[in-house]
Image: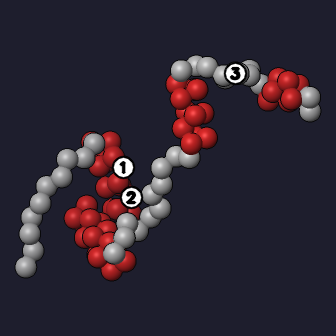
Amino acid sequence: MKIQTSVRVENTLYDEARTVFSKFGLSFGDAVNIFLAKVAMEKAIPFDLSLPSKELEKRINNLEGNKNTQVYNSANELFEDLGI
């Protein structure tokens, strides 16, 4: 038996994904079924999922808050500042 379901997805993601699926000769529904079959077989999400490390979170917060950051106009400027 098959069931019908609906999901809300961003238009851009949907369009880009459909383009990729079509290159494989797959419909959106085919691709979703492949994903679900893989999840069922592996009893896991079939790709790595992880949370950012504490260090990465700190760096992201610094960038978002524009603190403890230095912007360079060129690689040479960065190398000069590093003494390279």
Q: Quadrant of the N terminus?
A: bottom left
How crowded pointer 1 is (Cα within 10 Å; few <14, some 14-19, many 20+) is rated as few
SS at mark 3 in the image: loop
Q: CA distance from mark 1 to mark 2?
A: 7 Å
Q: Nearer the viewer, residue 58 or 63?
A: 58
SS at mark 1 in the image: helix
The residue type indicated by label 1 comes to: Glu
Q: CA distance from mark 1 to mark 3?
A: 33 Å
The residue type indicated by label 3 comes to: Val
Q: CA distance from mark 2 to mark 3?
A: 36 Å
Q: Dots 1 and 2: beta carbons under 8 Å?
A: yes
Return the residue at label 3.
71
| Residue 76 visible in the snapshot | no
Return the residue at label 1.
16
Viewer-side label of 2, 3: 3
How crowded pointer 3 is (Cα within 10 Å; few <14, some 14-19, many 20+) is rated as few
Residue 78 falls left or right of residue 50: right
Q: Earlier in the sequence, mark 2 or mark 3?
A: 2
Q: Return the x and y of residue 5 as percentages of the image width and height.
A: 12, 60
How crowded pointer 2 is (Cα within 10 Å; few <14, some 14-19, many 20+) is rated as few
Return the residue at label 2.
20
Residue 50 falls left or right of residue 68: left
Q: Is residue 32 above or below residue 80?
A: below
| Residue drawn 22% across the image and 64% down it | 29
